[in-house]
Amino acid sequence: MGLPLFSAQDDPGPDFFRFAKSAGLSAPQSSESIDLPHATTVIAVRYQGGVVMVGDRQATGHYIASRDIRKIEAADRFTAIAISGSAARGIEFIKLAQLSFEHYEKMTDTSLSLEGKANYLSPIIQNNNLTTPLTVMPLLAGWDASHKVGRIFEFDGAGGCYERADFATIGSGTPFAESALRLGFRSDLDLEAALELGALALYEAGDNDPSTGGPDFVRGLFPMMVIINEGGFQEVPTEAVAARFKTINDRRTNSGGIAGGTLR
Amino acid sequence: MSNYFYVNPEQLTKDRAEFAQKGIARGRSIVAAIYETGVVMVAENPSASLNKISEIYDRLAFAGVGKYNEFDRLKEAGIRWADGTGYTYSREDVDARALANYFAQYLGQVFSEGQKPLEVEILVAQLGNNIRPTKLYRVGYEGTITDEPMFAVLGGDAETIKGRFAASESELKPLSQTLKDCIAAISGPERTIPVSDIEACILEDRGTRRTFIRLNDNQVSELLG
C-alpha cells in the first residue's frame, strides 16, 4: 500500500471503515450460503458501578468447532464488544471495531463517546447483515466516562441500535439466559450480585442450549467473565470463574439437577 | 497559444529549496532523542491542541515542523497507512522504515513536480523490540531521508541546536536527563521556555500494546525536577 493521501473533499476523515472501503482493504461481500460455526450466549448485566459480561467459549457448526474461542474482547480501555452469529465475521467485526475506535482517537486526539461508538457500528452491522447470510449480532457495553455510568447497547439484525437499562443477551442461549436474568435482576445490584446473576444465567443457557458451552470441568475451560467500570476493562481471573461455576454446579448436583424453585 | 520559457533545472531546484527553507525557518524546532528505555520528542508549542507530535501506531510516532496543515496531512496519511497495513497483515509488520520511505518519496515528488515544495520537515520515530531496532528517521522537505543515530533535530535552527545537543549527549541517559538536555538545546542559553509551552511525548514500553505517551505539564515539571 502506498501513502494514502486524499484531497480535502474526498478525505474519509477519522472513519477507518470508510477509509478501508475506499482503499479496497475490506473483505468482499458474498451472498453464498455456507455453514459456519455459530451460536453463543453472551450476557451483559448493569450494576451500580458499571457492567458485568459473561460469555461462553464454544463455537458450533455441525459439531463443536472450538471450545475456547473468546467472544468478548476489549474494544478499547472502557468498552467491550461481544459477538454472536458467524464466528468468522464476528472476529473480523471485533478487529474492525477495535481498529476504528483507535484510528479515530489517533486522528482526532480525542476518544469517541460510548454512544458515538454504538452509533458508528450500526451501519456496519446493517451493511453486513443485509448483504450476506453471515450475520453478526454484537453487543456493546462500556463505561461512559462523560456520564460516569455503565451502559449497554444491543443491535438487531438490521443494525438497529438499542440501549438497555437493565441487561441484554445475544446468541442462541438467549431464551434461557434471559429467563434467569428476568427473575434475578434488580436495579441496585452490586458487583458481586451482578457476577453471580450473570454466571447463573450463563449456566442455565449452557444447560439447555446445545450450542452454548457451559463450564467444562474436564478441560478446565470456563466461560469468560468481564467487568467494565471506572477502572476500565478487566477480565475476572480463571481461578475465580472456576470457583464460582464449581459452587453453582455442586449446588445443582445436590438439588438433583434442577434449580429447586429458587434462582439458586 | 502559451509560451514556454526555459528554466535552468539547477536554478529551479535552488529556488525551490530556498523557498522551503524559508518557510520551515519561520517555525520552531523539534528535538527527538533516544534515552535508556525509549524515545523522547520535544517541541516548543504554545498551543495545547494543535499538536506537532502524534501517535502513529503501537511503536511509531510522528513529529513535524513547518506549515501545520501540510505536516498534519502527512501525519493523517501515516496513521492511515499504519492502521491499513496492520489490518491487512499483522500489527508487527508495521515498520518505520517503510513509512519513512513513503514520506520521502512523496516529499521528493512534490519538491520536483509540484506547484511548490512542501514547507515541512518530519520525523518518524520507532521504539525497538526484539524484531526491530529503535530508530529516528528524519525526512527533509526535498525528500532526503536520514537515519539519525542518537538524536534528531527538525526545523529552522537545526544546526545550532544540533551543536548544543551533541555537546551534552554521548551515551544513553535516563528520561529526566534527556528531557532536560532536549529543552536546553531548544531554548538555548539565554531563554527559558515555560512548561506550558512544551509539548513532550515519549515512546516507552509499559506492558501494553501501545507505547506512545503524551506527557502533561505536571509530568514534564516533575521530570525536570
Image: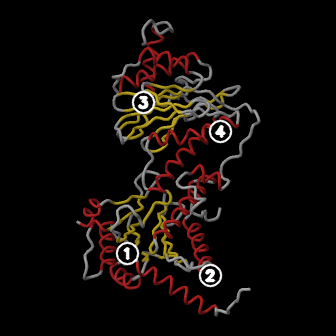
Can marks 2 and 4 be said to lie on one chain? no
Looking at the picture, how far across and down is residue A61, in whole percent? 68, 28
Can marks 3 and 1 be said to lie on one chain? no
- SS at mark 3 in the image: strand
* Residue matched to label 4: A128
Can marks 2 and 3 be said to lie on one chain? no
- SS at mark 2 in the image: helix
Identify the disc placed on residue A52. Answer: 3
> Which quadrant of the figure has residue A10?
bottom right
* Residue matched to label 2: B112
* Residue matched to label 1: B171
Q: Marks 2 and 4, how far apart in space?
A: 44 Å
Dot 1: chain letter = B
Q: Is residue A117 visible?
A: yes
Looking at the picture, how far across and down is residue A219, in whole percent? 55, 28
Three-letter amino acid code at the position of disc 3: Val
Q: In the figure, B38 relative to B7: above or below? A: above
